[in-house]
Image (cartoon, rainbow, N blue to C red):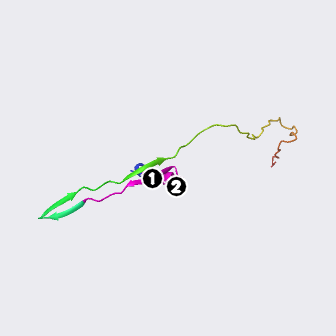
Amino acid sequence: MRSIILILILAVVLGIAAFATGLLNLTPTRTAQVPGVVAEDGKLKVQGGQLPAAKVEAGKLAIGQGEATVKVPRLEVRPAGSQPADNAVSTNAVQQ
């Protein structure tokens, strides 16, 4: 039961996020009408209503690739007691 509620909450949050970011756009094309009910001669006459209609436009997600320059930290392994390189960061161990 909890998992169903969690899934429903997640679906509502994703729907709100889609509308807020402009990924989803709804434009009403036809308004809704409730069914008409008339009482005549002790009988009820019901005329059908109309469901609303909307035009749904979804955004597009594009995934691509490109070149980028990324600085990567350099790792230097030195034996114990050797001196660090010029641009290497040294750490001093605390002796107890």
Q: Is residue 65 above or below residue 10?
A: above
Circle 1: element type: strand
> Of circles 2 and 1, which is in front?
1
Give the residue at x 14% y 64%. Answer: 40
Q: Is residue 11 above or below residue 71?
A: below
Give the residue at x 45% y 52%. Answer: 26
- Which one is in front, 53 or 3? 53
Residue 20 has which mark? 2
Residue 14: x and y in percent read 49, 51
- Which one is in front, 16 or 89? 16
Task: Bin the neighbour count of mark 1 within 10 Å (Cα to Cα): few under 14, some 14-19, many 20 and up.
Answer: few
Report if residue 4 lies within the magenta region.
no
User: In the image, which residues are magenta?
Assistant: 7-35
Residue 26 has which mark? 1
Residue 45: x and y in percent read 18, 59
Q: Is residue 60 above or below residue 17?
A: above
